Image (cartoon, rainbow, N blue to C red):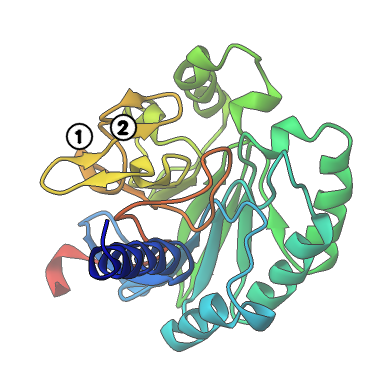
Amino acid sequence: MNAKKFAFSAAAAIAAAGLVHRGNVAVVVTRYTVTQQTLPPAFNGFRIAVVSDLHNTVFGKNNRRLISPLEEAAPDMIAVTGDMVDKVRTDIDVAAAVAGQLAAIAPVYYVTGNHEGKICDRYRILEEKLLSAGITVLRDRAVPLLRGGGSITLIGLDDPRFTDEDLTLSTEVLNEKLRGMDLPDGYRIVLSHRPEAFVAYASNSIDLALCGHAHGGQIRIPFVGGLYAPHQGFFPKYDAGMFTENGTTMIVSRGLGNSRFPFRLNDRPELVIADLFTEETS
């Protein structure tokens, strides 16, 4: 290889490496509009930010590449849908620090992911720090959200990893959890790590489900979608985006961090912003 070809190849390799690096550290904001007749008028325009699958990732000094767009979005609430920590490089202090930053922006509601289920006794320490930071931890329980005289129900589902080691049963586990809850009538939002359990949410009169876990398929193929997602396999159906079935809408975040597979391709870290509207005013 002559000097010119070598220089060109080296420059191309450096440029490609730079694009891959940027694609793993530059947070993109994806906005969704959810329009549903069942939403109480008092919640028209209610904004939810979804922070999912951080895996202890820090986006710049003091996490500014994540916190700045969150502050700019000014959400009414922040949903953290699991895997704040990573089972391999667990750093509870990093998770606690970002929890405090999130809580300074809006009320934060958190549910566990499968990685929290894998850190054993350290999860208790994590939960204590999240509670101390002002985070509402929802482990198989529901809370009312009140606004302008209206009310909706927010449900948080613990990850099936805490319940059953056979993760092929995750849909059945979550279905049983929902069936066992004495949920009030009215508009219902569920926070759950698992998008593969969409059928459980749709069959239990959930209006909106907010999920993560799939990492967008990790490698996204143009015009095809994600390559692989845990517990869905190759070319997953619920890799990212918004899905609707039987009156239930599910939004799946591509997430922010990486785990066992250390990088993303064509799959930038994603902060989701969902704006809720009633049918009459959309």
Q: Nearer the viewer, residue 60 or 134?
A: 60
Indicate the amino acid at tag 2. Answer: Ala
Coordinates of residue 175 in the picture (x, y in percent)? 47, 22
Q: Are marks 1 and 2 in contact (CB under 8 Å)?
A: yes
Indicate the amino acid at tag 1. Answer: Asn
Name above or below for residue 85 compared with residue 279: above
Identify the residue under disc 2.
202
Q: Which of 223 and 145 is in front in this view?
A: 223
> In the drawing, what numbered circle is on residue 212?
none
Q: Earlier in the sequence, mark 1 or mark 2?
A: 2
> In the drawing, what numbered circle is on residue 246?
1
Residue 139 placement, left or right of 50: right
Res 275 seen here: no
- Residue placed at 89% from the left, 48% from the top? 125
Real-space Cα separation, disc 1 to disc 2, in angstroms = 6 Å
Coordinates of residue 191 in the picture (x, y in percent)? 50, 47
Image quarter hosting the N terminus? bottom left
Residue 115 placement, left or right of 276: right
Res 141 seen here: yes
Coordinates of residue 124 in the picture (x, y in percent)? 87, 43
Secondary structure under the numbered disc 2 in the rendered image: helix
Residue 207 placement, left or right of 119: left
- Residue placed at 52% from the left, 54% from the top? 52
Q: Quadrant of residue 136?
A: bottom right
Q: Nearer the viewer, residue 19 or 254?
A: 19
- Residue placed at 29% from the left, 30% from the top? 236
Coordinates of residue 190 in the picture (x, y in percent)? 47, 45
